[in-house]
Image (spheres, grey):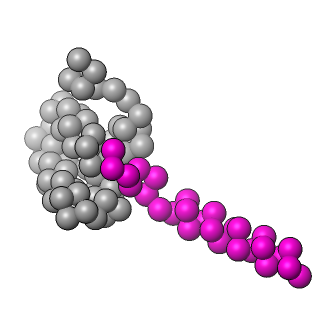
Amino acid sequence: MGAMKFSLAALVAAVAFAGAPAAANADTCAVAPAKLRALAASADTSTARKAERNIATGEALCEARNRAEAAKKFNLAARALGTELAAVLATETTALAQ
């Protein structure tokens, strides 16, 4: 019975961890806006506008130290641009690599 409780607790913790934004850390606030804006620069006007609104909201949330919600907004911007935030953060942009 004790092993079953431990297994259940481990499963609940794993599910809770998996549900949290993977990129909700300090680096997200520092890196995501520039990378997302670089992607938005090559998008059509309507898509770029939608992404920019979410990027600006994410930056405001970062300033308010609400990184988890900021990561959600950055992910919405990434999705509008046809990708995921994790993929954006995993790549280097030429502007940042110089």
Tally of numbered tags: 0
Task: Judge left or right: residue 77 versus residue 10.
Answer: left
Residue 25 place in picture, x, y as percent? 38, 52
Q: What is the magenta segment's predominant secondary structure? A: helix
Q: Is 37 or 63 nearer to us in this picture?
A: 63
Magenta stretch containing residue 3, yes or no?
Answer: yes
At horizontal 14% and vertical 53% (from top left) the residue drawn is 56
Relative to 94, residue 91 above or below: below
Note whether 59 is above or below 91 in the view shown: below
Residue 34 place in picture, x, y as percent: 20, 37
51 on left or right of 21: left
- Is residue 25 rendered magenta in the image? yes
Residue ranking furthest to the right: 1
**Residues in magenta?**
1-27
Residue 6 figure quarter: bottom right
The answer to whether one can see residue 33 in this image is yes
User: Which of the 4 image quadrants contains residue 93?
Assistant: top left
Q: Residue furthest top?
A: 98
Quadrant of the frame with the C terminus? top left
Q: Relative to residue 65, is residue 96 depicted above or below?
A: above
Q: Tell me which residue sits at (18%, 54%) in the image.
A: 59
Depth check: give the residue in front, 23 or 73: 23
Percent coordinates x, y for residue 26 in the rendering: 33, 50
Q: Position of residue 17 (x, y in %)?
A: 55, 62
